[in-house]
Every structure is written in structure tokens, then in C-alpha cells.
Image (spheres, helix red, strand yellow):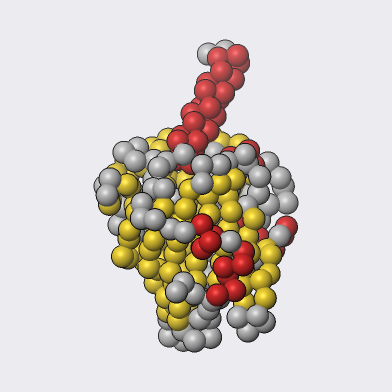
Amino acid sequence: MKTKCFIAAVLLLAGMAGLTAQGAGGYDIMKRADERYAGDTAQYKLTMTLVSGRGAPRIRELAYYFKDYGDTERILMFFNSPRDVAGTGYLSFSYDDNRDDDIWLYLPAMKRVRRITGSGKNDSFMGTDFTYEDMGRRSLDKDEFSLRGEETVDGSLCWVVEARAKDAREPYGRRVLRVRKDSYVIAGVDYYDRQGRLLKTLRVSGIRQIDGIWTAQKMEMTNVQDKHSTVIEISDIRFNLPLDDSLFAVTGLERGNIR
């Protein structure tokens, strides 16, 4: 997963200079994380488990495809099971010029493609604890970043970077990210709501190199307010294999699967 993102204080003058340097450090770290190489193409199998305090976990199987076009990154996903979501397709275009992502969802029951726009990007992605915006790339221009220190996560030293949303209407007032020093992979994120209360936590694990590319194999997003979580496990990971451009077109969503 290319995770793109999230991201990014003796004399009064000296104190201000220190804050400026600290803020620049946070931005620079997030820029390196945002530009981290994740392959020219990628194919995964995803197992998505939705867990709540009520009832049995719900398990979904997906196919994931990624292609980097230089100025645009495209992600295509199809739900393969269970039957109630099979054939549902997701397509996103992420741009290097900091435009917002373009996102489309194909709903087989309605037999049409729906475009996700505006505040709809803050909605839950298919009943999970991820929003549509969480699934895509967030422009660094939307946040103010500051470096808050260091922390060890799963034995790896990380920078702790705070990202404060510039727009007060954003659902997350701020995020606190842990960025691994060895790879610039994001190892975890705490999401806070507009009132400053902890809303969600993302924990990333199974981080290792596959074909020389740093790759996370498990992500768990937990909504601490709703007591609900979504676990994504990644398998059958393949990089830099040919993928036809026709896969990453809006018309391709209506196929309902890759054949």
C-alpha cells in the first residue's frame, strides 16, 4: 500500500526560530513519506474484517490494483465476496499537483457508477472504519505539520508528526502520525475530532521489504468512540507486472470484476 498523506517551535526571537525549524521538519518528513516509491504497478489480495461488539465479524475479500502514471496514481478495487457486496468496484485518481482525488464507486445492484464528491468523501467506505478520503491521498497543502518528537513502534524508531487541518470544517481537527525512520512508512495514526477528542487509531504492522519495496501487510483502523474496527490484511503481493490501462478507466468499473 502507498500510503499518501496525511501528513504534517532565551529570546522570543530564538523561540520563534525554533518553532519554525520544527514545523519545517514535520513537513519535510511527510513529503518524503508522500513520495516514497511503491512500485510502478502493484497487485494485492485484500481480506477485510469488520469487527464490532455485536455479532460475528464480517469478512470481505477484494482484489486491488495500482498503477503510477507519473503525474497521476490510479487505484482499482473489486469486492469478490461475500455475495451482498460482490462486484462492487472502487476507482480513484490521485494527482501530483495537489488536486483532490477523483473517486468513483460502482454499485452492481443499481448497475451504475456513482461519483464520490465533496463531503461524501468523509462518509464510511462500504461500512468500514475508513472514509473514502482515508483510502486515498491527502494533499500536504491541507495541513500544518510540526515535529513532536520520536517514538518506538514495534521495535522501529519513528518520528512523531502532528498534522493540523487548515480548514476548521474538516472531520479530523488534527492527526498524530508515526513515520518510520528506516523507510518513511507510516506505522500509525491517531485521529482527533473537531472537539479535540480521540476518534480513531490506525495501526500498521507486518512492514517489510518485498522486491525491494517497503510494504505494510496489515492495517487496523479502530473507532474508539463507536467501539468498532476494520482490519485489512494484504497477501499475494506482486509489484511491477504489466497492467493494461483499460483496467483503470471508469468504464472498466461496470465489468464488476477483472477477467
Quarter of the image for residue 13 reads top right
For the C terminus, give its image quadrant: bottom left
Compared across the picture, whether 198 is left or right of 120 comes to left
Residue 134 visible here: no
Question: What residue lies at 43% left-to-right and 69% top-to-bottom?
Answer: 63
Compared across the picture, whether 90 is left or right of 116 comes to left
Q: Position of residue 232 (x, y in %)?
A: 41, 66
Question: What residue lies at 55% left-to-right and 75% top-to-bottom?
Answer: 255
Q: Is residue 242 above or below residue 45?
A: above
Q: How many marks?
A: 0
Q: Position of residue 218 (x, y in %)?
A: 36, 61
Q: Position of residue 113 (x, y in %)?
A: 66, 71
Residue 73 visible here: yes
Q: Position of residue 7 (x, y in %)?
A: 53, 42
Question: What residue lies at 50% left-to-right and 81% top-to-bottom?
Answer: 86
Quarter of the image for residue 253 reads bottom right
Viewer-closest of 64 and 70: 70
Compared across the picture, whether 240 is left or right of 98 comes to left
Viewer-closest of 18 and 74: 74
For the N terminus, give its image quadrant: bottom left
Question: What residue lies at 47% left-to-right and 53% top-to-bottom?
Answer: 67
Q: Is residue 152 above or below residue 56?
A: above
